[in-house]
Amino acid sequence: MCGIVGFVNYKKDISSYRNVIVNMNEKLSKRGPDEEGYYISENVALGHKRLIVIDPEGGKQPMIARYEYGDYVIVYNGQIYNTKELRKTLLESGFEFEGHSDTEVLLKSYIYYGNDVVNHLNGIFAFAIWNSKNKELFLARDHFGVKPLFYTQVDNTFIFSSELKAIFEYPNVEKIIDNQGISELFGIGPAHTPGTTIFKNIFEIKPAHFAIYNQSGLHIERYWKLESKPHLDDFDTTCDTVKFLLEDSITRQLVSDVPLCVFLSGGLDSSIIAQFASDYCKKQNLPPLNTFSIDYVDNDKNFVKSDFQPNSDNYYIKLMTDNLYCKHHQIVIDTPELSEYLEDAMIARDMPGMADIDSSLLLFCKNVKNEATVSLSGECSDEIFGGYPWFFRDDALNSHTFPWSIALDERQTLLNPAIAERVDLKDYIDFRYNESLSEVDILDSDSKETAEKRKISHLTLNWFMQTLLDRSDRMAMYNGFELRVPFCDYRLAQYVWNIPWEIKALNGREKGLLRYISKDFLPNEIVDRKKSPYPKTHNPNYLAKVKSMLSDIMSNPSAPINDLLNRNYILDILDSDGKAFSRPWFGQLMTGPQLMAYLCQVNMWLEMYQPKLEL
């Protein structure tokens, strides 16, 4: 896991631009604290910040493969999980290897397969390969966009990076927020439209796409999408296939040359991963699996049950750890830390995000990093298997908008009235919502319910899941920590995509099929536990703290947030402890305290990034 950066210019010699690539690369230091490297020639400059996970000596980057007909140079962020199979094919085809890193396998796979390499990869990746003979740059991003890859063009130069902050280091790249940027930030955010950013003329390579940049310009192509087709397997075969794909994905992701662990909340998803990983460690005569959970000071005293968060985690965590071959660690975070790290979480995203839902994960990873460098997480199961409340609630299903973000009127009201006159958030959201639904392939054989659930699954996979993957990558990599997501295996997602909803939601339960499959190897209480989201603090001190922070900001009439948002509405939100904004800002957890923390992040972002408003 690493950070990558680079630029290409065919109009002039950029070999003297070393200071530029170094400055850009330095912005990615947190993603790769172990090593750095550069490749600079007449037309291209590449930089790399490395977090060592596999083959410390043999995986150095930029990596160069030299042939009589030219050099191939790679900078790469990610992990390839089918390295063993790829390596075998390459050896049989006459390739030789100097080490055992997946970087070398990926580079030589590109040399062997060309642009089709992306159709042979199972993993999480964002990479760029420079072909010196053809003077061509090839870039690609993994199937679901677990790893980020941004780009822009300015002054005849194509610029790319793992994070926006590095792109801003290139001369003459401007931070401009236009009508679309406002709509993305306050209408869609903290999600975003695939391929876009909140900044004008700065984009991302979409998940499951590759790009070629040469003297003819930029060409982008999609290489994979979920394919709708009839599900022909019987129930027993379906269960066996899902279990095989899950176990195979988890086992592949347990490969590491550095300490590895599993995040365990006692929920169904993390418990499945912990069980398979624990069994693997035991069978391989490895030390006990390290598992980690997060909690908050005094949460046991202050926990408030809700429809979205029906119970706390500790009882279920103990239930699992008592039966696992593991060593468990609990990370307890205090209220002041959550608020103090709101700015770091914003910097990690380069934009306001999910407030303390972000900062808590950032702190969790920061603490786990003391013991491990890689972790497996249960993220993405709810998106793939249908685990969210909006798959079942009529108000969400009938909202005719993104079901995790239905507070459209409140979002519009939050805009500064002068901006609200020129920016119609609902129109923009409706456009993106309908545009996304038009991509869904419905089969004639689909039942009415399966057809409807395909639509909401498509939205969830391409919008909500991407937001959580962004969060996982940014908060983990800010600490030089690698977070792997076994449920986000494209083979598993493809298979489950076509399972009829009546089977997927077996017995009318969220993730009913996954529960049924898990009953053979998990305790019944874990299998039957109602979904509980990522834990948040219930400490009233947190509300008091973020309310005080936002009050201090609003006591300054010249605070930049006043130019963008509705000052009077923010004061109402303060006076009502967040209740003036009657529904969650995003998802299930961003309610009163989180909304106030988010508004603090907006002001921090405006002060630090100083975007230019262009409406």
Image (cartoon, helix red, strand yellow):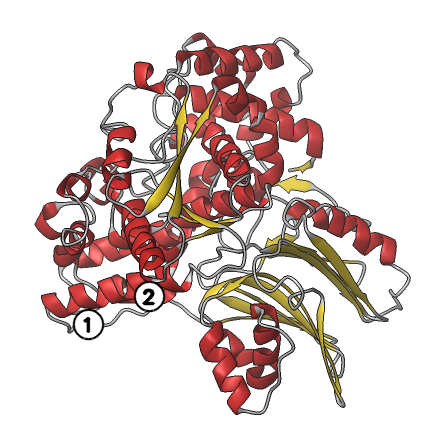
- Where residue 541 sits, quadrant-wise, is top left
Question: Is residue 258 shown left or right of residue 20?
Answer: left
Rendered residue at 74%/52% (across/down)? 25
Q: Is residue 565 visible?
A: no
Q: Quadrant of the N terminus?
A: bottom right
Rendered residue at 44%/50% (across/down)? 466
- Rendering coords of residue 257 (x, y %): 54, 59
Task: Find disc 1 in the rendering and name its residue.
Answer: 230
Q: State the separation of the CA atoms marked 2 and 1.
A: 24 Å
**Mark 1 surroundings within 10 Å by alpha-carbon count, few (fewer than 14), some (14 through 19), many (20 or more):** few
Rendered residue at 73%/60% (across/down)? 6
Given the current orientation, which residue lies at the most extreme left position?
507
- Rendering coords of residue 258 (x, y %): 54, 54
**Residue type indicated by callout 2:** Asp
Question: Is residue 393 shown left or right of residue 579?
Answer: left
Q: Earlier in the sequence, mark 2 or mark 1?
A: 1
**Residue type indicated by callout 1:** Pro
Q: Quadrant of the C terminus?
A: top right
Q: Nearer the viewer, residue 174 or 164?
A: 164
Rendered residue at 33%/32% (across/down)? 588
Q: Nearer the viewer, residue 247 or 389?
A: 247
Q: Is residue 137 above or below residue 363?
A: below
Question: Is residue 299 shown left or right of residue 125?
Answer: left
Q: Is residue 264 visible?
A: yes
Task: Find disc 2 in the rendering and name its residue.
Answer: 248
Q: Is residue 510 above or below residue 556?
A: below
Question: Is residue 48 shown left or right of residue 472?
Answer: right
The local secondary structure at tag 1 comes to loop
Q: Which mark is residue 557?
A: none
